[in-house]
Image (spheres, rainbow, N blue to C red):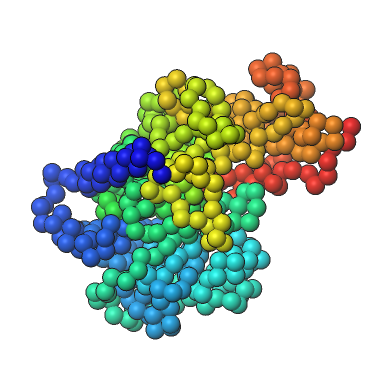
Amino acid sequence: MTNKLVSIVRTGALQSSLITLRANTSVLERPDRFARAVGAALPYGNGMLAAVAASAARYPRAVAIATADQQVTYAQPWRGSNAIARGLAEYGLGSTDRVGILCRNSPMFVYALLAATKLGADIVLLNTAMGPVQLADVVAGDNLTAVLHDDDFGAALSADGGACAFDATQLQLLARTRSRGWLKPPRRYSRLAILTSGTTGRPKGATRSSRGSSADTVGALLGTVPYRLRDTTVIAAPFFHGWGLANLLVGLGLSATVLTAPEFGAAHSLSLVADHKARGLVVVPTMLQRICELPPTQLAQANTDNLRIIASSGSALPGHLVTEVLNRFGPVLYNAYGSTEVALVSIATPAELHRAPTTAGRRALGVRVELLDELGATIAAASTVGRIFVASRARFDGYSNGQNKEVVNGLMSTGDLGYFDEHHRLYVVGREDDMIVSGGENVYPSEIEELLNSDVRITEAAVVGVDDDRFGQALKAVIVVAPNHHVDEQELKELIAHRLAKFKVPRIFEFVDELPRNAAGKILRRELKPTRSIVE
C-alpha cells in the first residue's frame, strides 16, 4: 500500500474512533454508566465483544433485541452466550473450529454469534434462504464443524451430516443450565465469513477478523449516518447479510433497541416504525419499494414523525424510488454502497440524493476510492467510466477457498464499474461482468433499467445480455408490469431509442410476475438468461 493510502486509512481510523465516541456520548447520561462501559469493554479490545460488553454493563435492563414474540435485555444475551459457549466447549468446540450460524433475525442470532465469538471459533453466517442441497454444499465447502440454527432448519441440515447441529431449543437449554457467570475472553479473535450474494454463481465465504474491522465499519457508517446513543431502530435487512449485520453492530454498540422480524413484511416494518416511534429503519432497496407500494391510506396513517434515518444498501437504488421516498418521508434517506469483500465504500446523504437521485454518494470515512482503466492507470476525468477499486482497513482477508480479489497498488477491486461527477460524487453503472458488448458497442444495463423503472406502468425491470450468433451478445429486458397497467413492447423500444440510443434497445422483452431475487434483495441475473443462443 502506498504512503498516501496508508495516511488516508490511518487518519480515517482516528477520526472513526472519535466519531464513534461522540455518537456514544450523551450529556444527559449518568457519568457512572459510561465509566462502567469502558471498564467492561477493555478486556475485549475494540471489536464486537467489546461493544456488547459495554452496552451490557451500561444499560443491562434496556431492551436490546425485540420481535413480536420475544424481547431480551442487554444483560440476557451477554450472560446467556457465556453459558452457551461453555456448553459448546463441553461438546468439544473451540478456537480451532468453524461454526455456521443459520438463524433468521431474532435474539437467537445474537446469542449464537456472541457464543461462537467467545469460543474464538471462526464463524460463517449462512443464508437462511438456501435449500438443503446448496446448504450442504456450503457446509462441506467451508469445512464447518458445527451449525447453530433455528429449530425449523433441522431437516435441511440433515441432508449434510458432516457437521454437528445445535438447534435453538438446545441452545436455550444450554443458556439455562450452564453457568452464566464471567467468561475469560478468548485467546484468539474469531474470523467472520459472510457469504457472497451468489447472484452469478456459488456463494463463497468472504472472511475478515472480528477484531478492528467491525469497529472501522461502524465508525465509517457513523461518520455520515446520524445514529445516536439509545436509538430505537427497525432492522428489516437480514442479519446474515453484511448490511444488516453492520447496522446490528452499530445498534448493539450504541445500546440501541433493535426491532426486527424473522421474515420481512412491508406493513409490519412500517407499523414497527410508527408504533415504537423508531428513529431509524434499515432496509435493502426491494424492501423499501415494497413499503412504498402499500396502499396510500395505510402510508398516510403511519406516524413516522420520529423517523430520521432510512438506511438502504445491498443493491442499486432506483432514482424514481429515491425521489418517492424523499417526497413521502422527508430528507431521511441514506444510500450506502459497498460489498461483502470491501465493506462500506460510499454513502449518499439526503441532500445529495435530492440533487442526484442515482448517486452512490461520497467515499466513506477512512476509505480510498479510485477508478482504474483496463491497464491499471488512474482515471481522473469526470464522467469517465472505470473499474472501481477501494482501500480500507475493513476490507476482507480473502475467500474461504483461498482465493482473493484483484489488488492493484494496495487497492482492491469491487468488481463494479462507475464514474465520478464534477462534484466528486460516485455513480455505479453495474458489475464488470454485467457490461454487455453488443455489435461492438458497450452497453451498461443500469441506464436502461433506470429508464424503464421510471415508467409508472412498470414495477421493476432488469436487463441482461444473452448469447447471440450475429452480435455476440443481445439485450434482453425482463419486466414486471404494474397492476392495472398495460405496456406495449414497441412503445418501449421507441422510448429507449429516443431517450438513449438505438443500439441500447433490447431485442427481447419478457414479461414476468416477479424478478428472481436472493434474500438480500439482489436480482439473480443468471436466472434471467436463456440456455440457448439467439439465431436470426
Quadrant (top left, top right, bottom left, bottom right) of the N terminus: top left
| Left or right: residue 59 compared with residue 336 | left
Residue 358 visible? The answer is: no
| Picture coordinates of residue 242, whole percent (x, y) | 46, 51
Q: Which residue is rendered at x = 85% and y = 36% of the image?
A: 469
Residue furthest to the right in view is: 536
In the rendered image, the vertical position of residue 257 relative to residue 376, given as above or below: below
Residue 392 visible? The answer is: yes
Quadrant (top left, top right, bottom left, bottom right) of the C terminus: top right
Number of dots carrying numbers: 0
Residue furthest to the left in view is: 31
| Picture coordinates of residue 138, whole percent (x, y) | 59, 64
| Picture coordinates of residue 388, whole percent (x, y) | 51, 36
| Camera-nearest residue between 329 and 386 | 386
| Picture coordinates of residue 447, whole percent (x, y) | 61, 27
| Left or right: residue 403 compared with residue 180 | right
| Camera-nearest residue between 210 and 73 | 210
Q: Which residue is rendered at x = 18% and y = 46% of the image?
A: 25
| Camera-nearest residue between 493 and 439 | 439
| Camera-nearest residue between 207 and 256 | 207
Asked where in the image residue 444 lies, by quadrant, the reply is top right
Q: Which residue is rendered at x = 28% and y = 40% of the image?
A: 11
| Left or right: residue 375 compared with residue 347 | right
Q: Which residue is rendered at x = 62% and y = 35% of the image?
A: 460
In the rendered image, the vertical position of residue 149 relative to residue 444, given as above or below: below
